[in-house]
């Protein structure tokens, strides 16, 4: 008999792929997970890596676990919150999504150039920045949000001469 409050399954259940699958289904019932996240979560609960691998293979086969679906939903949600492709890609890599799938999903995602322009306009107004200080401030804001330098340059408008500021 296990003590009350003990974490993880007992040693016999820890090696059982069906027990790991059941725990995975319970987790997936709450929210969608990437396969890397679910693997870490199940192993953190004490399931053996072999049992977890078997459970993940079965969940992937039944499409209960789908990295492509997870990535598409992740990109859509985070882009709607004003985050750029650099930040989204970094977070997806941390979830264990393969680089090829990240690139495909971002390419099929929203127009990040238009999103950067819209975000800059909402935050700083429709007028382009008039000084280098203001341009740098706006660029830092967009960079923090995860936009690439190409998106930032396009969102800030045409470049101007440094001599004009003098």
Image (cartoon, helix red, strand yellow):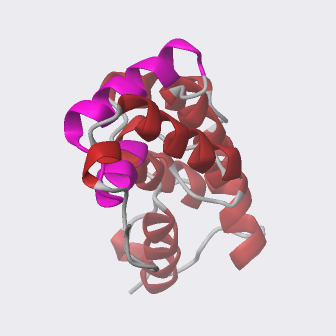
Residue found at x 40% / y 50%? 86
Asked if the magenta segment contains residue 44, the reply would be yes
Between 125 and 142, the residue placed more toward the observer is 142
Residue found at x 62% / y 31%? 109
134 shown above or below 75 = below
128 shown above or below 86 = below
Between 27 and 128, the residue placed more toward the observer is 27
Q: Main secondary structure of the magenta part?
A: helix
Residue found at x 68% / y 52%? 30
The quarter of the image holding the C terminus is: bottom left
Between 11 and 23, the residue placed more toward the observer is 11
133 shown above or below 49 = below
Which residue is situated farthest in the top direction here?
61
Residue 100 rendering spot, x and y as whole percentages: 34, 22
Residue 28 rendering spot, x and y as whole percentages: 61, 43
Between 156 and 59, the residue placed more toward the observer is 59
Residue 11 rendering spot, x and y as whole percentages: 25, 52
95 shown above or below 67 = below
Using residue 2 as the reference point, say whether residue 123 is left or right of it.
right
Residue 95 visible (yes or no): no
Using residue 62 as the reference point, say whether residue 160 is left or right of it.
left
Quarter-of-image position of residue 162:
bottom left
Q: Which residues are magenta?
A: 38-63
Residue 32 visible (yes or no): yes
The quarter of the image holding the N terminus is: bottom left
Residue 121 rendering spot, x and y as whole percentages: 74, 66
Asked if the magenta segment contains residue 12, the reply would be no
Using residue 150 as the reference point, say whether residue 74 is left or right of it.
right
């Amino acid at each position: 008999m296990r003590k009350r409050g003990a974490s993880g399954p007992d040693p016999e259940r820890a090696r059982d792929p069906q027990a790991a699958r059941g725990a995975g289904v319970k987790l997936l019932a709450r929210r969608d997970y990437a396969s890397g996240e679910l693997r870490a979560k199940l192993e953190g609960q004490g399931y053996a890596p072999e049992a977890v691998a078997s459970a993940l293979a079965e969940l992937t086969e039944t499409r209960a676990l789908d990295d492509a679906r997870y990535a598409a939903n992740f990109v859509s949600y985070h882009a709607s919150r004003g985050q750029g492709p650099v930040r989204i890609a970094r977070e997806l890599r941390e979830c264990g999504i393969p680089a090829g799938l990240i690139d495909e999903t971002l390419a099929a995602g929203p127009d990040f150039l238009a999103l950067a322009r819209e975000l800059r306009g909402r935050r700083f107004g429709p007028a382009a920045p008039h000084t280098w200080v203001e341009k740098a401030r706006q660029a830092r804001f967009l960079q923090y949000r995860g936009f690439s330098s190409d998106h930032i340059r396009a969102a800030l408008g045409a470049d101007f001469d440094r001599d004009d500021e003098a």
